[in-house]
Amino acid sequence: MEAIAFACLLAVAQTAGGAAPLALTPATLGLLGTTLVLVAALREIKSEKRGTAIVVTTLLVGVVLAIVLPAHRLDVVGWGGRVIAFAILAEIYLWRVVSLARGGVRWSDARNAAPFAATALAIAAVLPASLDRGPLVPLALILIAATGVALSVARSTEELSLARESAGAARVSSAHSVVFALGLGAMIAAVATPLVEHVLAEVGKVLAPAFDQLLFYVLLPLGYLAALVYAILAPFLRPVIANIRPNPTRTPEEDEALLREIERTRPFVIGGLEIVIIVFVILVALVLLERAVRERRIAMPDGAELERGSVDGLSLGETLRGLFPHRLARRRPPRDDGSASAALRVVYWRFLALAERAGHGWRVTAETPAEHQRRLAGADARWEAATPIVAAFEDLRYGEVAPDHATVSRARAVLRALEVAVRT
C-alpha cells in the first residue's frame, strides 16, 4: 500500500520540471523493496547514530532522485523547488515507514494507510499532467486487495492479542470473508469498468438538461433574495463606496514596467520562500529522528543509556598503531617574537640542547628544571654555573614573572660561558 501510494506521489513530483514521466511499475517495485529494508533497519536500531544515518540517507536519496531523474533545463529557482519537493516527499515517506516499523500490523496503521494510498492514486489519475497512467488500473486493484488483507490481518491480530489463553483459539473466519468479498468486488470492478463508464456517459447526456433546469430554479430565488438584501443595505453602503478610490488606470508601458519588475524580483521572493521551506524540512527531519528512537527509549530500563559508553583502555586503533615503529618527534626551538620571555625560553632551550650534546640527556617529563640542573651538576660541577638560567626560567614558567632585559642578558652570558667550558 505504501509503495503504491509513494510511487504515485513520486510520479506527480516528477512533473515539476521533469522531462519524461516516471514509470510506475519499476518505481512501485523499488519502493516496495526499499520499504521492507527500512522497516527491518528501523526495528533493529541500537543507537541514535544509526537512526540519524537512516534519516539523513533517506533525505539524500530524495535529493539525488530529484537530480538524477530526467528534467528540463531549469534555473536555480526551478531546481530549488524541485529538490525541496523531493525532500518533502522523502520526509513523508520516512514518516510512514517509521509508523510501520514501530510494531507489527496494527489497525490504526492499516486504517490510515488506506485513504492515504487511495488519495495518492486519485491525484495521479486526475492530475492534468504527463503521467504513466497505464499501470494505474492494476495498481488500483492491487491496492484494494492489499487494503482488505491489511485491515483483516490487523483486526485478527488485535483479536489474538486481546483473547490470550482464557478466550480460547481466535477465529479468523471474518478475515477470510472480508478478503473474499474484497476480491470479488475487485474482479467485478475490473470487468464492469468499461460498461459503467459507458452507462454513466449516456445517463449524463440525458440528465444534463434536466439538471441545468433544476439548478436554475434553485438559484433563481436566491438571486431575488440577494437583490432584496442589496436594496436594503444600499443606503448604508453608498458613503463607504464613495470613499473608496478607484484603482488608477495604467498605460501599457507602465504594465510592461511592472511585469519586468515582478520578473526581476521573482527569484528573490521564491528563493526566500524556499529557504523557509528548507528550514521547515530540517525541523521535520529532527522530529523524524526523535520518532525513530522514541520506542527504544521507552522500552529501556531506568538508568540505561541508548548510546554505547566509552571506557578507558587501549583501543583497537592504538593497538594497530603499536604494531608499527614510531618516528621520534623532532624537537623544535620556541618561537622568538622579540619579547624578553621568548628570548629567555630560547636561551633555556639552547641550554637543554647543550646538555644533550654533552651526553647528559634532555630533561625528562618527571623532572623540574632545578632537578635537571642538579643532576647535571652531580655529574659535572661546571653545570653549577647554569643556576641563573634555570632560576629565571622557573620564575617565568611557574611563577609567570616576565624577565627584564638585564636577566635575559645575564642568561645569555652564562650560556656562552657554559658553551666555552663544555667545549674546552
Image (cartoon, grey):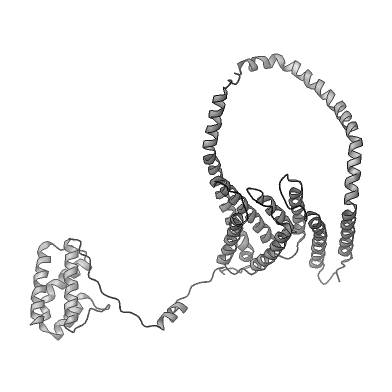
Q: Where is 256 relative to 7, above or below?
A: above
The quadrant the C terminus occupies is bottom left
Q: Residue at x 75, y 56 (%)?
A: 113
Q: Where is 392 relative to 266, above or below?
A: below
Between 176 and 123, the one nearer to me in the picture: 123
Give the image location of residue 201, x and y in percent.
88, 42
Give the image location of residue 51, x and y in percent.
59, 64
Give the image location of residue 315, x and y in percent.
46, 78
The quadrant the N terminus occupies is bottom right
Q: Residue at x 76, y 58 (%)?
A: 110
The answer to which image quadrant residue 97 occupies is bottom right
Q: Residue at x 25, y 79 (%)?
A: 364
Q: Residue at x 11, y 77 (%)?
A: 419
Give the image location of residue 161, x and y in percent.
79, 67
The answer to which image quadrant residue 140 occupies is bottom right
In the image, 151: left or right of 300?
A: right
In the image, 251: left or right of 104?
A: left
Residue 398 at least partly seen: no
Residue 170 at least partly seen: yes
Between 377 and 223, the one nearer to me in the picture: 223
Between 28 and 259, the one nearer to me in the picture: 259
In the image, 264: left or right of 422?
A: right
In the image, 33: left or right of 52?
A: right
Between 309 and 197, the one nearer to me in the picture: 197
Considering every residue shown, the one lying at the far bottom of the view is 379
